[in-house]
Image: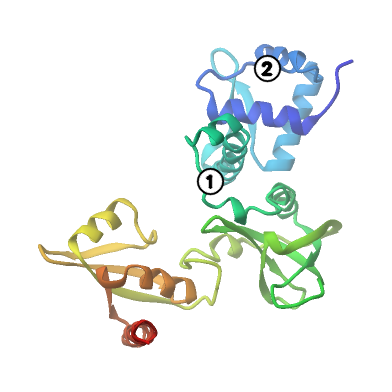
Amino acid sequence: MKQNHPLKSSIILLENVFFHLKKHNRKGFAQVLAEKELSHSAATISRLLKFIEDTFGIVLDFRGENGQVQLVEADENVSRYQFVKSLLLWGRLKHQQEWVSSGLISFTTESRLRNFEYILEVYEAILKSKMLKIKYQKFYLEKEEIRIIKPRLLKEYLGRWYLIGEKNDGEIRVYGIDRITDFEVLNQRFDPDPKFAELYKNTIGVNYSGRVEQVLLKVEPYQLQLFETYPIHPSQEIIEKHKNEGLLALKVVINYEFEQLLASYLDKVSVEAPEYLKQKMLAHFKKMTEKYQK
């Protein structure tokens, strides 16, 4: 008996869109579903396209000369497309155990991926503007806290995932996905707010303040070449480029993560402006030096 598992069928189709050069047409996709003993009628496939749109925010259709599956309105769907693609790619690689055990693939962030399976469900709640009730265990508290929030944004930083939520009083809070012990999607809805899509545009990490400043960095030549190929931030602009050094400008929120990033470059990068950040980094390095001299 053919079974109706829309999530399984969706992943099969999405993986074909994301990772296969030869795209399914309706007939070919129906055949794949039949081989996996999944429902594959024309009506089922039409409902499946609607399920993918409602669940993932990705609009697909069977079009083109051969009726192959393709993304509709790519410009509007690109961020959702890339997000879901990244999750599925992680899942595909993660479950290729023979690759992992052979040493061909190494997951340096594996210890940080607790509750990774929550992400798609939280993503769906954001997409449908549904309130979340979460149980959250802070590092420094013994008891769990219960919070009812508007889930606004998912953010990844250094291999760790965070939920950006808004309380009823408008306060924005950050919750590590790995610290959520349980959650429930509520039927209560809230109004979408476009500003949250831009919330972290100028923020490195998750500590958000909203105050954007211009930062000037003096950078050694080799490090500058690396920054050209892998920018610190999308606002990065190389102002000057000389034989012995370069000057780089950023428009970012100056927070803990940004300061830690600068500290990781030690003698390769120095702050030119603003002055207070220059003095703050100097104090960090003096304190570090004192620790090593003890």
The three-letter code of the residue at mark 2 reads: Phe
Q: Residue at x 72, y 15 (%)?
A: 30
> Which residue shows up at 48% across the image and 78% down it?
211
Residue under the image location 58 percent in, 45 percent down: 83
Q: What separation in Å lies between label 2 and label 1 (alpha carbons)?
A: 32 Å
* Left or right: residue 115 compared with residue 111: right
Q: Is residue 276 above or below residue 15?
A: below
Vertical position of residue 33 compared to residue 192: above or below: above
Residue that lies at the very extreme toward the right in this rendered image: 1
Give above or below for 10 relative to 245.
above
Q: Which residue is mark 2?
A: 29
Instruction: Please tell me whether mark 2 sits on a helix, a strand or a loop.
Output: helix
Crowd rating for badge 1 (residues with CA inside 10 Å; few <14, some 14–19, many 20+): few
Q: Position of residue 103 (x, y in %)?
A: 49, 36
Residue 241, given in percent of the width and then of the height, sits at 15, 63
Of the numbered discs in the image, which one, if any, rests on residue 107? 1
Q: Indicate the position of residue 2 as horizontal and vertical percent values.
A: 86, 17
* Amino acid type of the residue tagged 1 in the rendering: Phe
Quarter of the figure that contains the N terminus: top right
Q: Position of residue 198 (x, y in %)?
A: 53, 62
Q: Which sits earlier in the primary sequence, circle 2 or circle 1? A: 2
Residue 59 appears anywhere in the view:
yes
Q: Is residue 250 left or right of residue 32?
A: left
Quadrant in the picture for residue 50: top right
Q: Secondary structure at mark 1?
A: loop
Which residue is located at x 79 percent, y 76 percent?
Answer: 142
